[in-house]
Amino acid sequence: MSVTDTTSTPSLKDVLANSSKTSSTTTGGIASATNSATGGQALGKDAFLQLLVTQLKNQNPLDPQDNSAFVAQLAQFSSLEGITTLNSTVSGLAGNYNSSQALQASSLVGRNVIVQTNTAQLDDPSKGLTGSVNLSTSIAEGTVTITDSSGKTVRTIDLGSRAAGSASFTWDGKDTSGTLVPTGTYTFKASAPINGTATDLATYLPATVNSVTISQTGGELMLNLAGKGSVALSKVQTIGI
């Protein structure tokens, strides 16, 4: 009595053919797992595990992924998750910074600030005006010449002898004849002989903050000053009341 084996053993050709078919479905399987795990959102650890399982199911048995490749992929996903968390944290800090800027800006509107400029708006001549000049070295004498919008000199203030640093001066709002000048914009030019040469000096004058511009990109706060345009907050020397 003879027994015949009816089972068939797959040949190497058949195994390679099946491996080729399995390999061709890997991309589609991973893509399907990605969509299922993430729902179109950012990839995380859970998505990585599903991708890992799909990759194991669909890898070529004749050329499987090695352990180092899986570890490298896990490290990449961990780094991506860390960067995503860092971005969220930075975005939150930026929002808090913008809120702080808005609060700071609201307290500046209507107040006087001292900035480096050569013009000043005189709204109430009876109150006068106080400014300052920046001296790089001590001087024996110096003057501040004040002119109106037409270029006419209305007053000259004597600085006298001053030490190096910030030297203040006060204008009572009157011209050379002792009469109050009209409201308007006036120009200040300070000069002093330094090392035998007449030298122009930087003047710092008051201005009123009409409004504030807050940057939407995290830039510097800009103050819109009456009669002067926009000035960066970092350029302000003193904030008054």
Image (cartoon, rainbow, N blue to C red):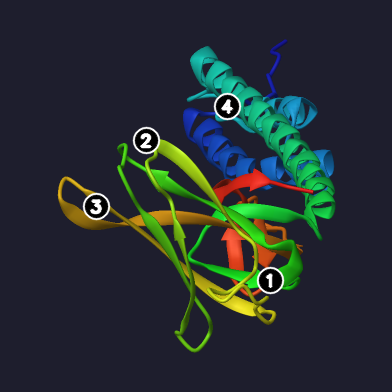
CB-based contact (under 8 Å), mark 2 and mark 1: no
**Residue at the extreme top:** 1
Marks 4 and 3 sit apart, C-alpha to C-alpha, by: 68 Å
Name the kind of residue labelled 4 in the image. Gln
Q: Nearer the viewer, mark 4 or mark 2?
A: 2
Query: From what the image shows, is residue 46 above or below residue 127?
Result: above
Q: Nearer the viewer, mark 4 or mark 3?
A: 3
Pointer 3 residue = 193
Name the kind of residue labelled 3 in the image. Pro
Q: Position of residue 39 (x, y in %)?
A: 84, 47
* Residue at x 60% of width, y 25% of height: 79
Label 1: element kind: loop
Compare marks 4 and 3 and give the one earlier in the sequence: 4
Compare marks 1 and 3 and give the one earlier in the sequence: 3
Pointer 2 residue = 164
CB-based contact (under 8 Å), mark 4 and mark 3: no
> Could you tell me if residue 9 is visible in this image?
no
241 left or right, relative to 219: right
Q: Position of residue 202 (x, y in %)?
A: 41, 55
Q: Nearer the viewer, mark 4 or mark 1?
A: 1
Pointer 1 residue = 226
